[in-house]
Amino acid sequence: MHGKACSSMGFAALLALLVCAAMLTGSGCGGTKPSKAQTIELYSQKLREAVSSNVHEEGRRSQLLLVVDRVEALHFLFSQETVEFVESYRKLNADYDSTRPAFDQLFADFNAKRIKARNEALDLHFQLASLATADEWDAIGKAETKLYEEANAARPVEESTK
Amino acid sequence: MMILTRERGQVLILLAAWLFFGGGAASALVAYDRPVSEVEKAIKRVIESADRRDLILSDLSQWESGQKKQDKEVSAGRDELLKILRRQNAQRSEAEPIIAKLDGRFLEMDRDFLNLRFRVKDEVTSTEWAEIVARDSR
Protein backbone atom coordinates (compact mmCIF):
# COMPACT_ATOMS: atom_id res chain seq x y z
CA MET A 1 0.00 0.00 0.00
CA HIS A 2 2.12 2.88 1.22
CA GLY A 3 5.31 1.25 2.35
CA LYS A 4 6.83 1.53 5.80
CA ALA A 5 4.70 4.38 6.96
CA CYS A 6 1.63 2.28 6.34
CA SER A 7 3.03 -0.83 7.91
CA SER A 8 3.49 0.92 11.20
CA MET A 9 0.29 2.84 11.36
CA GLY A 10 -2.48 2.23 13.82
CA PHE A 11 -6.20 1.74 13.69
CA ALA A 12 -7.00 5.38 13.22
CA ALA A 13 -4.58 6.02 10.39
CA LEU A 14 -6.21 3.27 8.43
CA LEU A 15 -9.48 5.14 8.47
CA ALA A 16 -7.83 8.01 6.71
CA LEU A 17 -6.44 5.64 4.13
CA LEU A 18 -9.92 4.27 3.59
CA VAL A 19 -11.23 7.74 3.09
CA CYS A 20 -8.48 8.45 0.61
CA ALA A 21 -9.10 5.11 -1.10
CA ALA A 22 -12.75 5.99 -1.46
CA MET A 23 -11.74 9.26 -3.05
CA LEU A 24 -9.25 7.62 -5.37
CA THR A 25 -11.63 4.90 -6.51
CA GLY A 26 -14.43 7.38 -7.02
CA SER A 27 -14.20 10.36 -9.27
CA GLY A 28 -10.68 11.23 -8.22
CA CYS A 29 -8.99 13.54 -5.75
CA GLY A 30 -9.22 16.55 -7.98
CA GLY A 31 -11.69 18.49 -5.82
CA THR A 32 -10.34 21.70 -4.35
CA LYS A 33 -12.98 22.26 -1.69
CA PRO A 34 -11.70 20.88 1.65
CA SER A 35 -14.03 18.18 2.87
CA LYS A 36 -14.68 16.84 6.32
CA ALA A 37 -13.07 13.62 5.17
CA GLN A 38 -9.91 15.56 4.41
CA THR A 39 -10.00 16.93 7.91
CA ILE A 40 -9.97 13.35 9.16
CA GLU A 41 -7.11 12.61 6.81
CA LEU A 42 -5.15 15.51 8.25
CA TYR A 43 -5.47 14.19 11.80
CA SER A 44 -4.60 10.69 10.60
CA GLN A 45 -1.53 11.97 8.82
CA LYS A 46 -0.37 13.43 12.11
CA LEU A 47 -0.83 10.01 13.68
CA ARG A 48 0.98 8.29 10.82
CA GLU A 49 3.94 10.61 11.28
CA ALA A 50 3.93 10.03 15.02
CA VAL A 51 3.80 6.25 14.57
CA SER A 52 6.48 6.23 11.89
CA SER A 53 8.83 8.05 14.18
CA ASN A 54 8.03 5.85 17.20
CA VAL A 55 7.73 2.25 15.93
CA HIS A 56 11.09 0.98 14.70
CA GLU A 57 10.84 -2.81 14.88
CA GLU A 58 9.99 -4.41 11.57
CA GLY A 59 8.49 -7.51 13.16
CA ARG A 60 5.88 -5.62 15.09
CA ARG A 61 5.22 -3.42 12.11
CA SER A 62 4.32 -6.52 10.10
CA GLN A 63 2.04 -7.73 12.85
CA LEU A 64 0.37 -4.34 13.04
CA LEU A 65 -0.14 -4.40 9.30
CA LEU A 66 -1.95 -7.72 9.47
CA VAL A 67 -4.28 -6.31 12.08
CA VAL A 68 -4.77 -3.18 10.02
CA ASP A 69 -5.69 -5.29 6.98
CA ARG A 70 -8.46 -6.90 9.02
CA VAL A 71 -9.64 -3.50 10.18
CA GLU A 72 -9.76 -2.37 6.57
CA ALA A 73 -11.84 -5.36 5.53
CA LEU A 74 -14.14 -4.81 8.49
CA HIS A 75 -14.79 -1.20 7.56
CA PHE A 76 -15.58 -2.03 3.97
CA LEU A 77 -17.85 -4.90 4.99
CA PHE A 78 -19.78 -2.82 7.49
CA SER A 79 -20.04 0.12 5.09
CA GLN A 80 -21.66 -2.21 2.58
CA GLU A 81 -23.97 -3.64 5.21
CA THR A 82 -25.03 -0.12 6.11
CA VAL A 83 -25.81 0.63 2.46
CA GLU A 84 -27.90 -2.51 2.24
CA PHE A 85 -29.76 -1.64 5.43
CA VAL A 86 -30.60 1.86 4.20
CA GLU A 87 -31.76 0.51 0.83
CA SER A 88 -33.95 -2.11 2.54
CA TYR A 89 -35.41 0.55 4.80
CA ARG A 90 -36.24 2.75 1.85
CA LYS A 91 -38.11 -0.05 0.12
CA LEU A 92 -40.02 -0.98 3.25
CA ASN A 93 -40.72 2.63 4.15
CA ALA A 94 -42.07 3.39 0.68
CA ASP A 95 -44.82 0.79 1.13
CA TYR A 96 -47.73 2.40 2.97
CA ASP A 97 -48.87 -1.02 4.18
CA SER A 98 -45.57 -2.26 5.60
CA THR A 99 -46.06 -3.65 9.09
CA ARG A 100 -44.27 -2.72 12.29
CA PRO A 101 -42.89 -6.25 12.77
CA ALA A 102 -41.22 -6.00 9.37
CA PHE A 103 -39.41 -2.83 10.46
CA ASP A 104 -38.54 -4.30 13.84
CA GLN A 105 -36.94 -7.28 12.13
CA LEU A 106 -34.99 -5.11 9.71
CA PHE A 107 -33.63 -2.97 12.55
CA ALA A 108 -32.80 -6.02 14.67
CA ASP A 109 -30.89 -7.62 11.81
CA PHE A 110 -28.87 -4.46 11.19
CA ASN A 111 -28.11 -3.97 14.86
CA ALA A 112 -26.87 -7.55 15.09
CA LYS A 113 -24.45 -6.81 12.25
CA ARG A 114 -23.40 -3.53 13.85
CA ILE A 115 -22.72 -5.17 17.20
CA LYS A 116 -20.73 -7.96 15.53
CA ALA A 117 -18.63 -5.40 13.62
CA ARG A 118 -18.19 -3.24 16.73
CA ASN A 119 -17.02 -6.21 18.76
CA GLU A 120 -14.54 -7.11 16.06
CA ALA A 121 -13.33 -3.51 15.95
CA LEU A 122 -12.77 -3.69 19.69
CA ASP A 123 -10.86 -6.95 19.32
CA LEU A 124 -8.61 -5.32 16.75
CA HIS A 125 -8.17 -2.24 18.91
CA PHE A 126 -6.95 -4.36 21.81
CA GLN A 127 -4.64 -6.29 19.51
CA LEU A 128 -3.07 -3.04 18.35
CA ALA A 129 -2.73 -1.87 21.93
CA SER A 130 -1.01 -5.09 22.89
CA LEU A 131 1.41 -4.88 19.97
CA ALA A 132 2.62 -1.37 20.79
CA THR A 133 4.96 -0.49 23.59
CA ALA A 134 3.85 1.98 26.24
CA ASP A 135 5.91 4.71 24.63
CA GLU A 136 4.52 3.98 21.17
CA TRP A 137 0.96 3.71 22.40
CA ASP A 138 1.03 7.17 23.85
CA ALA A 139 1.19 8.61 20.32
CA ILE A 140 -0.96 5.94 18.63
CA GLY A 141 -3.71 6.00 21.24
CA LYS A 142 -3.86 9.76 21.35
CA ALA A 143 -4.20 10.02 17.59
CA GLU A 144 -6.69 7.16 17.39
CA THR A 145 -8.96 8.88 19.88
CA LYS A 146 -8.55 12.15 18.04
CA LEU A 147 -9.60 10.59 14.78
CA TYR A 148 -12.69 9.01 16.32
CA GLU A 149 -13.59 12.40 17.72
CA GLU A 150 -13.19 13.90 14.27
CA ALA A 151 -15.27 11.12 12.65
CA ASN A 152 -17.98 11.93 15.17
CA ALA A 153 -17.78 15.63 14.40
CA ALA A 154 -17.95 14.81 10.69
CA ARG A 155 -21.21 12.85 11.05
CA PRO A 156 -23.04 14.03 7.95
CA VAL A 157 -26.49 14.65 9.42
CA GLU A 158 -27.47 17.44 7.07
CA GLU A 159 -25.16 16.49 4.25
CA SER A 160 -26.07 12.93 3.47
CA THR A 161 -26.87 11.67 0.00
CA LYS A 162 -28.54 14.33 -2.05
CA MET B 1 -21.61 -4.72 -5.31
CA MET B 2 -23.00 -1.25 -5.44
CA ILE B 3 -20.85 1.41 -7.09
CA LEU B 4 -20.31 4.37 -4.82
CA THR B 5 -19.68 7.93 -5.83
CA ARG B 6 -16.72 9.66 -4.25
CA GLU B 7 -18.89 11.66 -1.88
CA ARG B 8 -20.99 8.65 -0.96
CA GLY B 9 -17.85 6.65 -0.33
CA GLN B 10 -16.51 9.27 2.05
CA VAL B 11 -19.80 9.50 3.88
CA LEU B 12 -20.01 5.73 4.22
CA ILE B 13 -16.55 5.27 5.60
CA LEU B 14 -17.09 7.99 8.17
CA LEU B 15 -20.48 6.62 9.03
CA ALA B 16 -19.11 3.11 9.52
CA ALA B 17 -16.42 4.41 11.88
CA TRP B 18 -18.96 6.47 13.76
CA LEU B 19 -21.52 3.67 14.04
CA PHE B 20 -19.08 1.43 15.86
CA PHE B 21 -19.47 3.60 18.94
CA GLY B 22 -21.86 6.42 18.13
CA GLY B 23 -25.21 5.18 16.89
CA GLY B 24 -27.64 2.46 15.93
CA ALA B 25 -30.06 1.79 13.10
CA ALA B 26 -32.12 4.96 13.52
CA SER B 27 -28.94 7.04 13.70
CA ALA B 28 -27.73 5.51 10.44
CA LEU B 29 -30.99 6.46 8.74
CA VAL B 30 -31.00 10.00 10.11
CA ALA B 31 -27.40 10.41 9.02
CA TYR B 32 -27.51 8.64 5.70
CA ASP B 33 -31.07 8.36 4.44
CA ARG B 34 -32.68 11.71 5.01
CA PRO B 35 -32.21 14.65 7.38
CA VAL B 36 -35.23 15.68 9.46
CA SER B 37 -35.26 19.08 7.77
CA GLU B 38 -35.97 17.37 4.43
CA VAL B 39 -38.88 15.42 5.90
CA GLU B 40 -40.32 18.62 7.34
CA LYS B 41 -40.10 20.30 3.96
CA ALA B 42 -41.86 17.40 2.27
CA ILE B 43 -44.66 17.44 4.86
CA LYS B 44 -45.16 21.17 4.50
CA ARG B 45 -45.35 20.76 0.75
CA VAL B 46 -47.59 17.69 0.60
CA ILE B 47 -50.09 18.05 3.47
CA GLU B 48 -52.63 20.71 2.60
CA SER B 49 -54.74 20.43 5.72
CA ALA B 50 -53.29 22.86 8.24
CA ASP B 51 -54.57 20.84 11.21
CA ARG B 52 -52.99 17.60 10.08
CA ARG B 53 -49.83 19.34 8.94
CA ASP B 54 -49.37 21.05 12.30
CA LEU B 55 -50.06 17.83 14.17
CA ILE B 56 -47.42 15.95 12.18
CA LEU B 57 -44.88 18.75 12.49
CA SER B 58 -45.53 18.82 16.22
CA ASP B 59 -44.86 15.06 16.39
CA LEU B 60 -41.63 15.59 14.47
CA SER B 61 -40.59 18.43 16.72
CA GLN B 62 -41.22 16.39 19.86
CA TRP B 63 -39.25 13.48 18.45
CA GLU B 64 -36.40 15.79 17.52
CA SER B 65 -36.27 17.22 21.05
CA GLY B 66 -36.09 13.71 22.46
CA GLN B 67 -33.36 12.79 20.01
CA LYS B 68 -31.25 15.76 21.04
CA LYS B 69 -31.44 14.68 24.65
CA GLN B 70 -30.57 11.10 23.74
CA ASP B 71 -27.75 12.28 21.49
CA LYS B 72 -26.21 14.11 24.45
CA GLU B 73 -26.33 10.97 26.56
CA VAL B 74 -24.84 8.90 23.75
CA SER B 75 -22.12 11.47 23.25
CA ALA B 76 -21.23 11.37 26.95
CA GLY B 77 -21.09 7.58 26.94
CA ARG B 78 -19.03 7.55 23.79
CA ASP B 79 -16.55 10.03 25.26
CA GLU B 80 -16.26 7.89 28.37
CA LEU B 81 -15.65 4.81 26.23
CA LEU B 82 -12.97 6.51 24.15
CA LYS B 83 -11.28 7.69 27.33
CA ILE B 84 -11.02 4.08 28.48
CA LEU B 85 -9.80 2.84 25.11
CA ARG B 86 -7.17 5.55 25.14
CA ARG B 87 -5.40 3.74 27.98
CA GLN B 88 -3.16 0.97 26.73
CA ASN B 89 -3.76 -1.20 29.80
CA ALA B 90 -7.54 -0.83 29.65
CA GLN B 91 -9.46 -4.07 29.95
CA ARG B 92 -12.39 -5.03 27.82
CA SER B 93 -14.43 -5.53 30.96
CA GLU B 94 -14.12 -1.79 31.63
CA ALA B 95 -15.62 -0.92 28.27
CA GLU B 96 -18.43 -3.46 28.25
CA PRO B 97 -20.81 -1.78 30.74
CA ILE B 98 -20.64 1.46 28.77
CA ILE B 99 -21.16 -0.38 25.50
CA ALA B 100 -24.17 -2.20 26.95
CA LYS B 101 -25.63 1.11 28.10
CA LEU B 102 -25.08 2.64 24.65
CA ASP B 103 -26.69 -0.33 22.94
CA GLY B 104 -29.71 0.05 25.22
CA ARG B 105 -29.94 3.72 24.31
CA PHE B 106 -29.72 2.90 20.60
CA LEU B 107 -32.62 0.49 20.94
CA GLU B 108 -34.70 3.23 22.56
CA MET B 109 -33.79 5.58 19.72
CA ASP B 110 -34.79 2.95 17.16
CA ARG B 111 -38.11 2.42 18.90
CA ASP B 112 -38.80 6.18 19.03
CA PHE B 113 -37.88 6.51 15.37
CA LEU B 114 -40.29 3.78 14.31
CA ASN B 115 -43.02 5.09 16.60
CA LEU B 116 -42.72 8.43 14.85
CA ARG B 117 -42.74 6.80 11.44
CA PHE B 118 -46.02 5.03 12.18
CA ARG B 119 -47.61 8.07 13.85
CA VAL B 120 -46.91 10.15 10.76
CA LYS B 121 -48.07 7.42 8.40
CA ASP B 122 -51.33 7.07 10.30
CA GLU B 123 -52.04 10.77 9.77
CA VAL B 124 -51.65 10.75 6.00
CA THR B 125 -53.24 9.02 3.02
CA SER B 126 -51.35 6.52 0.92
CA THR B 127 -51.06 9.11 -1.84
CA GLU B 128 -49.61 11.70 0.53
CA TRP B 129 -47.25 9.10 1.96
CA ALA B 130 -45.98 8.25 -1.52
CA GLU B 131 -45.19 11.92 -2.12
CA ILE B 132 -43.52 12.38 1.24
CA VAL B 133 -41.18 9.42 0.84
CA ALA B 134 -40.51 9.90 -2.88
CA ARG B 135 -36.75 10.23 -3.41
CA ASP B 136 -37.11 12.76 -6.23
CA SER B 137 -39.28 15.04 -4.13
CA ARG B 138 -36.37 16.41 -2.16
Image: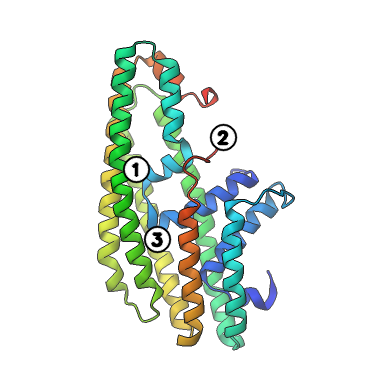
Q: Give the chain letter at badge 1.
A: A
Report if the CB atoms under discs 3 and 2 are less than 8 Å apart.
no
Residue A71 image point, x, y percent: 51, 66
Residue annotated with mark 1: A107
Residue toward you, B19 or A153: A153
Three-letter code for the amino acid on which mark 1 is drawn: Phe
| Residue A28, above or below A146 | above
Residue A63 image point, x, y percent: 54, 80
Three-letter code for the amino acid on which mark 3 is drawn: Arg
Residue annotated with mark 3: A118
Which element type, helix, strand or loop, lies under badge 2?
A: loop
Which residue is rendered at x = 42% and y = 19% of the image?
Answer: B44
Residue annotated with mark 2: A162
* Residue placed furthest toward the top: B49
* Mark 3 or mark 2, whichever is nearer to me: 2
Which residue is rendered at x = 31% and y = 23% of the image?
Answer: B56
Distance in Å between CA atoms under marks 3 and 1:
16 Å
Residue A144 image point, x, y percent: 49, 69
Q: Give the chain letter at badge 2.
A: A
Which element type, helix, strand or loop, lies under badge 3?
A: helix
| Residue B17, above or below B64 | below
Distance in Å between CA atoms under marks 3 and 2:
28 Å
Asked where in the image residue A46 lies, by quadrant, the reply is: bottom right
| Residue A129, above or below A155 | below
Three-letter code for the amino acid on which mark 2 is drawn: Lys
Same chain? Circles 3 and 2: yes
Q: Which of marks 1 and 2 is nearer the N terminus?
A: 1
Same chain? Circles 1 and 2: yes
Which element type, helix, strand or loop, lies under badge 1?
A: helix
Same chain? Circles 3 and 1: yes
Q: Give the chain letter at badge 3.
A: A
